[in-house]
């Protein structure tokens, strides 16, 4: 940690150039990016690709662009204020609003953990054939083990989580090469906006799975104290480094999501198996059957690794939420245990794991405005942000993103 801080200070002083200057600042966005490739993304992207082919690729791309903007604002708030978004809310909003924001954030955290923990358990179940109940317990043990890495320093935990993301990247690189989707069809789906009939639920799910409320809170905390700028000039330079971090991390996450959707479209939609993506167990078996080369096993490994990594990040976010909004904290392992309970209950009663993943993402989409609106308001205040205050174009873009997300939710409610 000392070496990283020293390297960062050398970079700010101009003693490091190029990639050597950037390296000490990489990390926060990659931790946040874990939430953008979690099991909820697996469920929504595979279901979208199987049912609608490449048609919702533009939703994946748009949601990823939204994520880049939002995570940049979150990182900027932490750099400018030295506080997380929940801490800024507690300092500047009426108490009753803060309590309300905390309650909805905790509900969102539960939905987040439902997706992540269920996904990890499902990955174990598919790979080794053990019952979902036993898989859930093993997933819990694995998550506790990863979280315990923080005892040796946050940078070590950060490195482990980033390494797990690398496994997911490799897995879907393999899947994409094996399934061979037509590049023209993938590009058309990503660049030609069109919402097929009946796709509203999945479109909102994609947004909910991509723009995750809990990492809006987390990212601001990760940048608030990682490297502290001595003045306005240093803070601006830190922010420029962080923009690169965000673009790289979110860019990787976006490519993974498109690879998921394209794989499902090529393997299932192309064969008329539009309902196959609605069950990740069927996806696992179908990849092995239609693609071969252990494609299903690779998918199962990616799902397991994603679930463990994102579950750890979700627990970290929950700590930030409670500490920021209430100024209180519970032990991280106790929080991990408490947030496992809803997933364990659903698994115990036999509820469809894949259905739980998709519905949890819809719930998350409704939680986005509660994090996004305060973020946009605060980052637009010069008295708070100083020289890092949002420019007019940034404000317009951020407001537009908020309006689109709220409109999607309203559309879902009115159309069912």
Image: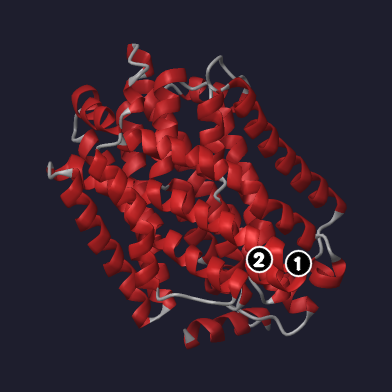
Report x, y in % for residue 349. Answer: 25, 40
- Quickly name the residue at label 2: 85
- Residue found farthest to the front: 96
Number of the label disc, if any, that sits on residue 283: none
Circle 1 residue = 94
| Mark 1 residue crowding within 10 angstroms, few (<14) / some (14–19) / many (20+) | few
**Residue 15: quadrant of the picture:** bottom right
Instruction: Out of 229 and 328, give the one closest to the viewer.
Output: 328
In the rendered image of this protein, does residue 322 appear above or below residue 401? below
Is residue 263 shown left or right of residue 138? right
Asked if residue 102 can be seen in this view, the reply is: yes
- Which residue lies at the image location 50% right of the left edge and 63% below the top edge? 317
Is residue 259 in view?
A: no
| Mark 1 or 2, closer to the camera | 1
Q: Residue drawn 33% across and 74% down?
A: 149
C-alpha distance separating marks 1 and 2: 15 Å
- The answer to whether 396 is drawn above or below residue 355 in the figure is below
- Work out whether mark 1 precedes mark 2 in sequence or the reverse, and give the earlier one: 2
Residue 378: x %, y % from top left: 77, 62
Could you tell me which residue is drawn at 83 percent across and 70 percent down? 387
Find residue 217 and report its horizontal and vertical position in percent.
Answer: 59, 62
Q: Quadrant where the C terminus lies?
A: top right
Element type where label 2 sits in the image: helix
Q: Secondary structure at mark 1?
A: loop
Give the quadrant of residue 314: bottom left
Q: Is residue 383 left or right of residue 97?
A: right
């Amino acid at each position: 940690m000392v070496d990283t801080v020293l390297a960062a200070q050398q970079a700010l002083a101009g003693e490091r150039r190029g990639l050597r200057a950037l390296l000490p600042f990489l990390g926060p966005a990659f931790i946040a990016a874990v939430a953008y490739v979690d099991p909820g993304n697996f469920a929504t992207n595979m279901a979208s690709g199987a049912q609608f082919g490449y048609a919702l690729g533009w939703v994946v791309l748009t949601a990823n662009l939204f994520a880049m903007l939002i995570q940049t604002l979150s990182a900027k708030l932490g750099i400018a204020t030295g506080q997380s978004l929940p801490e800024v809310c507690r300092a500047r909003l009426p108490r009753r609003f803060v309590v309300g924001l905390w309650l909805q954030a905790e509900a969102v955290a539960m939905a987040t953990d439902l997706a992540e923990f269920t996904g990890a358990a499902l990955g174990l179940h598919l790979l080794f054939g053990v019952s979902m109940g036993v898989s859930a317990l093993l997933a819990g043990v694995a998550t506790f083990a990863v979280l315990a890495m923080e005892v040796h320093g946050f940078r070590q935990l950060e490195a482990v989580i980033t390494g797990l993301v690398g496994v997911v990247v490799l897995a879907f690189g393999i899947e994409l090469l094996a399934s061979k989707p037509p590049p023209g069809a993938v590009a058309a789906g990503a660049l030609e906006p069109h919402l097929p009939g009946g796709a509203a639920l999945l479109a909102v799910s994609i947004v909910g799975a991509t723009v995750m409320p809990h990492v809006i809170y987390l990212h601001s905390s990760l940048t608030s104290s990682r490297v502290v700028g001595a003045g306005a000039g240093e803070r601006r330079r830190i922010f420029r480094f962080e923009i690169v971090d965000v673009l790289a991390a979110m860019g990787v996450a976006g490519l993974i999501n498109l690879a998921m959707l394209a794989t499902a479209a090529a393997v299932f939609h192309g064969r008329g198996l539009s309902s196959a993506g609605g069950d990740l167990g069927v996806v696992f078996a179908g990849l092995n059957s239609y693609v071969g080369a252990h494609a299903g096993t690779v998918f199962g490994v990616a799902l397991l690794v994603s679930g463990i990594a994102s579950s750890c990040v979700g627990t970290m976010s929950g700590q930030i939420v409670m500490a920021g909004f209430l100024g209180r904290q519970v032990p991280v392992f106790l929080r991990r245990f408490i947030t496992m309970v809803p997933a364990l209950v659903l698994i115990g009663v036999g509820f469809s794991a894949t259905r739980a993943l998709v519905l949890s993402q819809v719930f998350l989409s409704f939680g986005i405005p509660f994090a996004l609106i305060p973020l946009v308001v605060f980052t637009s205040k010069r008295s708070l942000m100083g020289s890092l205050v949002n420019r007019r174009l940034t404000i317009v873009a951020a407001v537009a993103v908020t309006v689109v997300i709220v409109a999607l939710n309203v559309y879902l409610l009115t159309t069912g």
